[in-house]
Image (cartoon, rainbow, N blue to C red):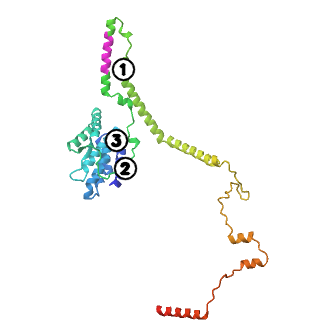
């Protein structure tokens, strides 16, 4: 099943990319894309004993898009995809969606954001999954098996699916704004009461800004609008001919090639351990360069005979006598001994026959 993991991931990425291009969070829009791609046919062709395992693989892949760090629209698309795959699976009874306890808080926060934004399609689909008992609450998000790899290969995450980090929006939410407004009103009352008892005017104590909460809200909204406008301008610049990123990459590549050509063009400096050796130049060759050291050259050593001829000079008849080979001792046999040996050889041949 690991061979199908990448193929299933690419199909899920494609349907979510098309859903993202619509800039909508309606289930009607997603179902239209689902029918156009004929995505329900992903379960066709599986054998009986592979149906449950294949359903497990597809649901795990779609479940990853329901969690952060993906943007709200991609998470909504992941929820719709998870619901559609759960209803269209061919395994009977249907395979359940594994929901770990550590991810339950993210799902509840996602539901609360949908309620605040009044996206009732999202709330309805999530409640339908809960009503069908599609979730099975587990301790771990993936099934632990024996002889499983410790380090699983992580799939690459697309930047376009990610939600841009926005600290001001996270720090100043509706709950904190309400709490801040209550604290501000209480502090303002205490300030006025202190100014009346002391007899000074209330305007003399400028210890806090007026309309602090409204100013914070307007600044956060302005920052968010500026952020969105900047993203659009960057996308327009990248979509034009000769994108800025491509130009920067080409300039960087040319700069690196120039540095490499300069580095390889210069002569390599000799190490300190070899600077005392003098470089011998062979002028007979076409190109002048350091000649090979004599120690590494292969020379044929003369033989002992040639060295003795070269070094030892013998004159006259002594040379002939020295070079001629003489037998020092000779063994002579009598005719009787020869006949006896012949008879012994003949008897040995007969025995062998």
Secondary structure state at the residue bearing disc 1: helix
Q: Quadrant of the N terminus?
A: bottom left
- Which stretch did the figure color magenta? 181-193
The x and y percentages for residue 306 are 71, 71
Q: Which residue is mark 2?
A: 10
Q: Position of residue 224 (x, y in %)?
A: 39, 31
Question: Residue extending furthest top?
Answer: 199
Q: Is residue 336 above or below residue 50?
A: below
Labels 3 & 1 near each other (Cβ < 8 A) = no
Residue of label 3: 74
Give 39 or 340, whichever is nearer the viewer.
340
Q: Position of residue 89 (x, y in %)?
A: 25, 51
Asked whether, in this view, residue 123 is left or right of residue 300, the answer is left
Q: For mark 3, does the 10 Å Cα neighbourhood hold few (<14), some (14 to 19), or many (20 or more) residues?
A: many
**Residue drawn at the location 40% of the way across and 28% of the way down:** 222
- Nearest to N terminus: mark 2 or mark 1: 2
**Residue 212 got which mark?**
1
- From this view, report whether residue 68 is shown above or below residue 270: above
């Amino acid at each position: 099943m690991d061979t199908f993991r990448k193929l299933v991931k690419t199909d899920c990425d494609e349907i979510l990319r098309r859903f993202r291009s619509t800039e909508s969070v309606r289930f009607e829009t997603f179902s239209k894309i689902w029918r156009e791609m004929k995505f329900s046919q992903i379960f066709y062709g599986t054998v009986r004993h592979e149906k449950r395992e294949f359903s497990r693989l597809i649901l795990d892949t779609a479940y990853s898009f329901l969690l952060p760090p993906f943007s709200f629209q991609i998470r909504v698309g992941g929820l719709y995809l998870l619901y559609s795959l759960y209803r269209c699976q061919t395994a009977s009874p249907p395979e359940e969606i594994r929901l770990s306890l550590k991810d339950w808080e993210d799902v509840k926060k996602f539901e609360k954001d949908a309620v605040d934004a009044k996206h009732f399609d999202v709330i309805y689909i999530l409640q339908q999954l809960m009503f069908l008992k599609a979730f099975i609450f587990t301790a771990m998000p993936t099934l632990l098996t024996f002889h499983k790899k410790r380090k699983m290969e992580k799939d690459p995450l697309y930047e376009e699916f990610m939600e841009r980090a926005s600290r001001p929006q996270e720090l100043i939410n509706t709950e904190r704004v309400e709490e801040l407004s209550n604290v501000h009103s209480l502090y303002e009352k205490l300030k006025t009461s202190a100014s009346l008892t002391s007899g000074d005017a209330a305007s003399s104590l400028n210890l806090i800004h007026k309309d602090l909460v409204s100013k914070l809200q307007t600044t956060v909204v302005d920052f968010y609008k500026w952020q969105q406008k900047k993203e659009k301008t960057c996308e327009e610049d990248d979509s034009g001919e000769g994108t800025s990123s491509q130009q920067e990459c080409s300039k960087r590549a040319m700069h690196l090639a120039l540095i490499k050509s300069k580095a390889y063009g210069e002569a390599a400096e000799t190490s300190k351990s070899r600077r005392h050796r003098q470089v011998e130049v062979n002028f007979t060759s076409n190109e002048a360069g350091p000649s090979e050291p004599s120690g590494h050259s292969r020379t044929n050593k003369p033989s002992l005979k040639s060295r003795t001829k070269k070094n030892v000079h013998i004159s006259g008849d002594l040379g002939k006598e020295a070079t001629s080979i003489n037998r020092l001792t000779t063994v002579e046999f009598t005719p009787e001994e020869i006949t006896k040996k012949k008879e012994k050889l003949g008897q040995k041949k007969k025995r062998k026959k």
